[in-house]
Amino acid sequence: MDAQRDPFWKPALLVFLACVVFYVAGFAAVQWWRERRGPWEVTFRVEDQGAPGIQIAQPRLGIGEVTLVFRGTNHVTLAAAVTIRFNEPTTADAIPFGRVKFLDTTFLPGTVTFDLFGHEIELLPRTLIVDKQERPWRTGDRLELPPINAGSAGRR
């Protein structure tokens, strides 16, 4: 007789509320884990001599002011430097020159691969890859990349 007096909806409601709390807490924890280190910050600019360049930073990883300059490609005009934070997939369309070949923002900072004037630049948390050659991250580094002519681009 006691089973008939206790309505089923009370324990069901408690289970439902516990599931909602667990889901919300789990989702918040995963989002925090995804975003805790923050995105890559890439500034696209034109140097004094007219050569385009990018400056890479990732403050949470201690990476800052790594500059790549593309010599011999003076056909880019920018009114001012543009800084893009690669924290979501839609940022791939916002770069002022070159193109984004690959972008993974699942767990920030993620991976960003650019094709800039024939050079493949890949930003990974552990290393910088320039034209398939790994380079350690060193704050303040400046790399000047030569122009790639059409004949040598396929041989890299």
Image (cartoon, rainbow, N blue to C red):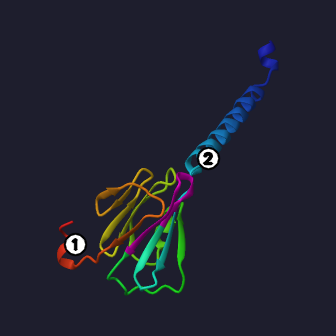
Q: Position of residue 19 (x, y in %)?
A: 67, 34
Name the amino acid type tagged 2.
Trp
Q: Nearer the viewer, residue 36 or 56?
A: 56
Q: Position of residue 27 (x, y in %)?
A: 62, 43
Residue 118 vertical placement versus 12 (above, below): below
Using residue 99 as the reference point, say whether residue 156 is left or right of it.
Answer: left
Using residue 101 as the reference point, say whether residue 81 is left or right of it.
Answer: right
Residue at 51% of width from left, 50% of height from top? 107
Where does the N terminus fall, quadrant-wise? top right
| Numbered label attached to residue 28 | none
Q: Nearer the viewer, residue 28 or 97?
A: 97
Cα gap from disc 2 to disc 1, whole angstroms: 41 Å
Circle 1 Cα neighbour tier, 10 Å, few/some/many (<14 / 14–19 / ≥20): few
Whether the residues at callouts 2 and 1 have beta carbons within 8 Å, the answer is no
| Numbered label attached to residue 32 | 2
Q: Position of residue 146 (x, y in %)?
A: 29, 75
Name the amino acid type tagged 1.
Ala
Q: Decide whether residue 65 is among the magenta residues.
A: yes
Circle 2 Cα neighbour tier, 10 Å, few/some/many (<14 / 14–19 / ≥20): few
Residue at 77% of width from left, 16% of height from top? 3
The segment highlighted magenta reads: 56-69
Quickly name the residue at label 1.
153
Identify the secondary structure beneath mark 2: helix
